[in-house]
Image (spheres, rainbow, N blue to C red):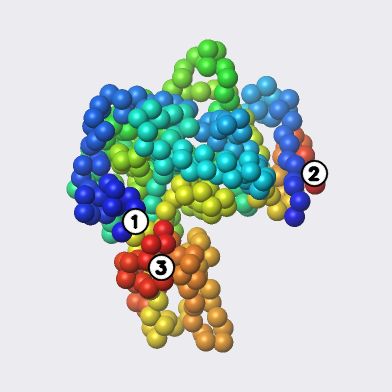
Amino acid sequence: MGKTKIEIDYSLCGESGKVDPRDCAKCLKACDPAVFLMHETIGKEDEQENPYDPQDWRITPIWGSLCSRCLKCIEVCPENAITVEW
Amino acid sequence: MCQFCVKHGAGKKWYLNARNYKADVLGSEEDMVNYLEEQWMNFETVFIRKIMGFSSKNLGYKMKMPIIGRLLRWKAENMIHSEKERRNAQRADGHFGQAIPLEDGIAILSELAEEPILCNYCMCRWMQRGEKEAVCLNFGALSGILEKMPRFMPKERTNPIDREEAIEILEKNNKKGYIASVWFQPVPYINAICSCESPECGGLTLRENFGLNAFYKAEYIIDLDQDKCQGCKQCVAMCQFNAIRYIPSMDRVIIDYDKCFGCGICRHACQHDALKLIPREEFPGFDGEY
């Protein structure tokens, strides 16, 4: 299997989108091989009000090579923020 | 015994050496606390931080690249096992674990683990599945740090728990099918017993999918008594490593000993006493295969 390119449109989901991935997380649950990773964003330490409780989160399709191309993530995403190409 | 028992076990298994449970095992307790605080404040960003200019994103593809792939693997292994004085806490240098059977987990929790013991959310499962489940047991210096971080602490249980309760939680999770594991953080300081699941566990996913040794097989391996197996298939559903398969023609299961991590979870499902854990070194061919 060749490379699979998974992308998330962060204007729709994540720290600048209207959906907080912590409330949704549908793609994380739908993906059998667990390709997605929900994490705190980096590079904004100064703006962080409380370092013990970060507020900005996003989802990164981190283990792309494990993707089995089932496209269930696209099906469940309420914002249609995910694209998968190969 | 594995290489870490030889190096950090003082003649025993590494996780049975009481010295490794003291926060001053490397000298300064303050340095240890600082490391852990920085590591846990940045816990969820560990995989997106860069190593030699590469983040872990699409690690599988990157490691297939000629030369660069081999360099990345070498660098990642060095990071995971780092015993250098100045370790990068944000990248969790020196943090790796090993599967343990329930019995060893109970031995650790009943005596060796330093109080206070906390039960907090598994962050791996949260990051990979969006599920908050309080299954991780942390002890010693790490507990003092996690107490301050609300995102790790279940609201219903923010106070330290006693040893009996910790054992109860571990046993419940083990019987449910989670793999007990003990963690260096950073090596040789031990401060956590987790109940892991593949592929959500950060260590297991690195080991299973990319062959990085962030998670080791147990000091044990399963031994199937072929005459006792009745072919009920219950154990097959328990194994997270696809090490057990049912064979209709013989009406019994077969074990792929190469895949067995020696966690002993399958034993909970066997009603016929056919599955036993034996020390890995007593199993010819699999001695030294961690």
The reply to whether label 1 and label 2 mark residues of one chain is no
Viewer-side residue, B51 vs A25: B51
Q: Considering only vertical position in the picture, is B158 above or below B284?
A: above
Question: In this orientation, which residue lies closer to the viewer: B232 or B5?
Answer: B5
Q: Residue at x 52, y 43 (%)?
A: B74
Q: CA distance from mark 1 to mark 3?
A: 12 Å
Q: CA distance from mark 2 to mark 3?
A: 42 Å
What residue is at 60 percent from the left and 34 percent from the top?
Answer: B55
Please state the chain letter of the residue tagged with numbered disc 2 in the rendered image: A
Residue B124 falls left or right of residue B116: right
- CA gap between label 1 and label 2 equals 43 Å
Q: Quadrant of the C terminus of chain B?
A: bottom left
Which circle, 1 or 2, is nearer the viewer? 1
Which labelled disc corresponds to residue B2? Answer: 1
| Pointer 2 residue | A85
Residue B4 versus residue B190 in the image, above or below = below
Left or right: where A57 falls relative to B42: right
Residue identifier under label 3? B286
Residue B247 x %, y %: 55, 80
Instruction: Tell me the subunit letter for badge 3.
Output: B
Please identify the quadrant where the N terminus of chain B is shown: bottom left
Res B267 visible: no
**Which corner quadrant of the image does residue B89 belong to?**
top left
Residue toward you, B214 or B245 = B214
Instruction: Using the image, determine if residue B194 lies above or below residue B47.
Output: below
Q: Is residue B184 visible?
A: yes
- The amino acid sitting under disc 1 is Cys
Give the SS element for disc 1. loop
**Residue placed furthest toward the front:** B67
Q: Chain of mark 1?
A: B
